[in-house]
Amino acid sequence: MKKNIIIITIIIFLISSFLYVWARYVETKGLNVKEYKISTNISDNFNGLKIVHFSDLHYSSTVNKSDLKKIVDKINFINPDIIVFTGDLIDISDSEKIKEVTSELKRLNAKIGKYAVNGDKDINEFDIIMKNCGFTVLNNSYELIYKNSYDSIIISGITSNLKDNDNVSNKLKTTYEYLEQNNAVYKILLTHEPDIIDNTNIFDLVLAGHSHNSQINLPIIRDFTKIDGAKKYYLPYYKVNNTNLYISGGLGTSNYKLRFLNKPSINFYRIVKE
């Protein structure tokens, strides 16, 4: 009996050790591209619009300079019209790490533009870093994208609600004011925390991060590891009323340096006229 207990204990230890090593050193590496086709009311001028969405880099958690170089190369290979980042770039204010991130993100190429919003873990230098990399930081603001001087897309962004806990309507005030007077064919919102979607219903497409789609992607464990800001919406996709909500699985790790059944990923959207 005692011998059997010892054997079982050793087996459990070996399995646990293997799973830990796998989740720590294998699942945190590599890069998946999740491709989505979105059929919607977009105009002919924007038919076929390509958007790449990346999020939650948490640079130097499990993502190093070599990893980031591969991520940038993959995004550039897709040749997107628009690149968006939805927060949590780097958690620690380290001048060398900031230099590395800036050097790589500067290489990102988008035919129309690059846009970003901050996350709850982002350092104070976030806005400066992203602007130095050629991103437009949408701090409770919006930008209009025109094509052929006729139709427009409005892309709006709000600051992290966990970091800046203001009413979502207040954050979107300028967007609402514009839309009351003008018509944008297609409306996109960038946010870090997906749960804010219940406070607005005017957007066709909402892109978010924060949840990582649960780093440990096992149903029982996933339910216990939900985080504030992504307790209701945390999986890759939801249809909320008439809005498409896509949540990035992220690239780095937060709180614990583990991933399981959920490798680092970026999202690639093709927007087509229905």
Image (spheres, grey):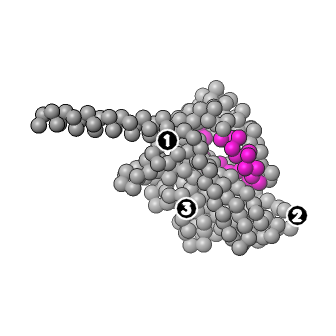
For the question of whether residue 217 can be seen, the reply is yes
Q: Mark 3 or mark 2: name the one nearer the start of the chain.
A: 2
Determine if the magenta segment contains residue 89.
Answer: yes
| Residue 220 percent coordinates (x, y) | 36, 54
Identify which residue, 232 or 7, lies in the foreground. Answer: 7
Q: Which mark is residue 237?
A: 3
Mark 2 residue type: Asn
Secondary structure beneath dot 2 equals loop
Classify the position of the N terminus by image quarter: top left
The residue at which mark 1 appears reads as 27
Secondary structure beneath dot 1 equals loop
For the question of whether residue 174 can be seen, the reply is no
Identify which residue, 177 or 23, lies in the foreground. Answer: 23
Identify the residue at horizontal 77%, vertical 54% (top origin): 81
Q: Nearer the viewer, mark 3 or mark 2?
A: 3
Q: Nearer the viewer, mark 1 or mark 2?
A: 1
Residue stretch in magenta: 71-91
Identify the residue at horizontal 46%, vertical 61% (top origin): 232
The residue at which mark 2 appears reads as 148
Question: What whole-number distance in Å separates the C-alpha atoms at marks 3 and 2?
Answer: 32 Å
The image quarter in which residue 88 lies? top right
Q: Nearer the viewer, mark 3 or mark 1?
A: 1
Mark 1 residue type: Glu
Identify which residue, 165 or 32, lies in the foreground. Answer: 32
Identify which residue, 10 or 164, lies in the foreground. Answer: 10
* Disc 2 crowd, CA 10 A, few/some/many (<14, 14-19, 20+): few
Identify the residue at horizontal 74%, vertical 45% (top origin): 76
| Residue 84 percent coordinates (x, y) | 68, 51
Q: Mark 3 or mark 1: name the one nearer the start of the chain.
A: 1
